Amino acid sequence: MANRVLLGKRGSDYGLFVSKPTKDVTSADRKDLIFDSTDLRTSTVHAIKEITISSGTGSVNLNSDGSSMGFIPYVLWTQISGNNILGQTGHFSWSFDGGQATFSYGTDFAAHVSNTSITITRTLNSGYASGTFKFLVFNIPAE
């Protein structure tokens, strides 16, 4: 039976390492590790955040104290209504007014992410100025 879990020194790194079945954690290649706490490609969910806006813009801190994560995280987001997932709503319009054509297309809201906060803003004058949004914030630093 192979040694599959190691908490401590592996090569020149210290951390937690878990290998695939039948692979010895002390000599396994990167592709044979299920988990490597020193690997920046390993992801965790940092937080689940929610923003409710009533006037077209709103924001939330990524950390409760407003401090920086040290990098800009990867974020997935969607608009919700109660228990219903609305997704990222879009808008399309086309109209003629006395020979003048008016055309607009795009998403109703945009999420702007920094290393300290998320801001949701209304992007189009589509009538959708309010909403509730859920954000899944991943702790995936860029290499």
Image (spheres, rainbow, N blue to C red):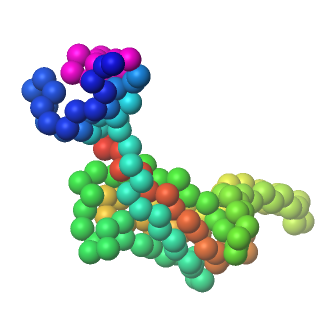
Instruction: Residue 49: give x, y in percent of width and height.
Output: 47, 68
Q: Residue at position x 70%, y 63% from top?
A: 85
Which of the 4 image quadrants contains residue 2?
top left
Quadrant where the image shows the C terminus: top left
Q: In screen coordinates, is 129 left or right of 33?
A: right
Q: Residue at position x 51%, y 71% from top?
A: 50
In the image, which residues are magenta? 22-33
Q: In screen coordinates, is 93 left or right of 12?
A: right
Q: In screen coordinates, is 53 left or right of 9?
A: right
Q: Is residue 91 above or below residue 38?
A: below
Q: Is residue 86 above or below residue 39?
A: below
Q: In screen coordinates, is 47 left or right of 30?
A: right
Instruction: Residue 15: give x, y in percent of width and height.
Output: 19, 38
| Residue 113 in view | no
Seen from this angle, which residue lies furthest left? 12
Q: Is residue 10 above or below residue 71?
A: above
Q: Nearer the viewer, residue 12 or 90?
A: 12
Q: Residue at position x 51%, y 62% from top?
A: 135
Seen from this angle, which residue lies furthest front? 1
**Does the magenta portion include 45?**
no
Q: Is residue 25 above or below residue 108?
A: above
Q: Residue at position x 66%, y 58% from top?
A: 88
Q: Nearer the viewer, residue 95 or 66?
A: 66
Q: Nearer the viewer, residue 15 or 132?
A: 15
Quadrant where the image shows the N terminus: top left
Q: Is the magenta region chiefly helix, strand or loop? A: loop
